[in-house]
Image (cartoon, grey):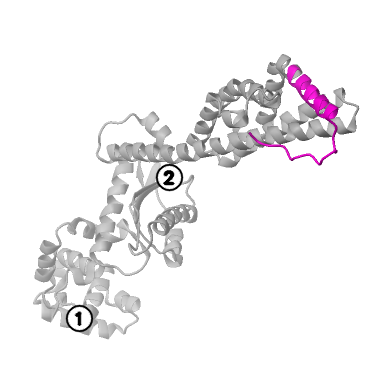
Amino acid sequence: MAKLPDPVEGSRPDHADSQVREIVSAITAVADARLSEIAGAIVARLITEIEYFAADQPILDQLNAGAAHNFAITMEILRHDIEIEQVGPSGPATELARLLAQRDIPITALEHAYRLYQDSVVRWCLQELALRSESATVTAGAALEITTLVSAHVNLIAQQLLSTYEFERDAWRSRRSASRSARINDILANRPVEVEPTEKLLGYHFGQFHLGIIAWSDRTQSPEVGLAHLESAATALACQLGTCAPPLFEARDEHMARAWLPLGNSETVDSERLSAVKRRWDSPVIVAIGQPRDGVEGFVRTHNEADLARIVVQASESSGPGIVCASDLGAVTLMCNDLSTTRAWVADILGPLGVDDTAAAQLRATLREFLRTGGSYAATADALHMHKNSVVYRLKKIEDQLGYPVRDHRLDLENALELAFWLGAAVLRQE
């Protein structure tokens, strides 16, 4: 039982102690008679001063169910009918802590609620005390006893409920994360799902355009740092692209996550803004991006596109952070699941140009730009900052090495050059 400070010898006569007990007992008797009224006033104050409580009926139900019980217990403690250590949180109080945790309402709201409860009880008791005592000594003694016992009671209960909150928050997040992941996996596997309940669970709307992303970080980072960077990268990308709402984010493991950026009715992403984001990207995270797609089917498709782009980047052993869009990769994304076959095909198409050295890389860059510009020597020269005659010379050299005019095998050459550009050593011959 919480102990009051030992009085200084002779500081308060025995009859004053007796009067303190009598007054405190009288106050608790009034409280018992007005229990419902006082409990209702406490609940009204909590609802007014804590914004999270007012519009949540289950929370209101637990407040109303527990207020009278808590106040009655506090009065029993003041009468010394029960010791503080024998009192645990009531059922409604425990359920309230669990509800706050499940709704991700900050733990400070629970702490605030019990500080308001303590203040409300002490205020009411002191008001009653002022009506019943004319002795300064008795009034001071009773006030000290009331504030000390109420504070000790509230501190003990609050500590227990804060532990309940933290345990439930961790357990709830784990259960919710598993449920969210299962529902997302059902959608991606094209299993039937009920859209409205799924939207409610995920907090995400399917009837719009989506931009799927896969984000991953260096596995040498600590798990906490990796996850923090992944989520902040997804949020930053959504913000910089001006999406209509926060992304749907799901960690796949400690260093990889998938997310969907909600685009609303926008069928495209502003290309200039995206290019600017790519140039300024300084997060220690690599991001692969699908294309904007609509509805539930689009939710699946844009994710698959982002995942294929990820495969390309990882197959290329890209060093360092960056952003890669599936739209930039074209057919390359379709040819990375079997790298040994892809490597052999690139060697067949590029021949001497498929060697992983500087000279072949220079010729590949010239041919790639030539084909990308529609076979224009002048446009290729401008893009590569070369003289037109130098481009003509290189193209002649390329055709000599290949043994055929490049325009005769344009489609195969374009695909092979894109694979070499994105995957590099993964598909080139080492000599």
User: As displayed, is residue 100 above or below residue 255?
Assistant: above
The disc, 2 or 1, on the residue closer to the chain's N-terminal end is 2
161 relative position to 382: left or right: right
**Viewer-side residue, 405 vs 224:** 224
How packed is label 1: few (under 14 Cα within 10 Å), some, or many (20 or more)?
some
Residue segment shown in magenta: 1-29
Query: Residue 40 is drawn in which quadrant?
Result: top right
User: As displayed, is residue 266 above or below residue 72?
Assistant: below
| Amino acid marked by disc 1 | Asp
How packed is label 2: few (under 14 Cα within 10 Å), some, or many (20 or more)?
many
Query: Residue 350 is drawn in which quadrant?
Result: bottom left
The residue tagged with tag 2: helix, strand or loop? strand
104 relative position to 111: left or right: left
Q: In percent of the image, x 69 and y 17: which residue is there?
A: 35
Report if the CB atoms under discs 2 and 1 are less than 8 Å apart: no
**Residue 421 can be seen in this image:** yes
**Residue 5 among magenta residues:** yes
Q: Position of residue 174 (x, y in %)?
A: 39, 40
Residue carrying label 1: 357
Q: Position of residue 117 (x, y in %)?
A: 67, 31
| Amino acid marked by disc 2 | Pro
**Viewer-side residue, 20 vs 377:** 20
Query: Looking at the rendered structure, which numbered label has been put on residue 262?
Result: 2
**Quadrant location of the N terminus?**
top right
Query: Looking at the rendered structure, which numbered label has been put on residue 387?
Result: none
Real-space Cα distance between discs 2 and 1? 43 Å
Which residue, as the protein is rendered here, is positioned at the far top?
33
**Residue 230 among magenta residues:** no
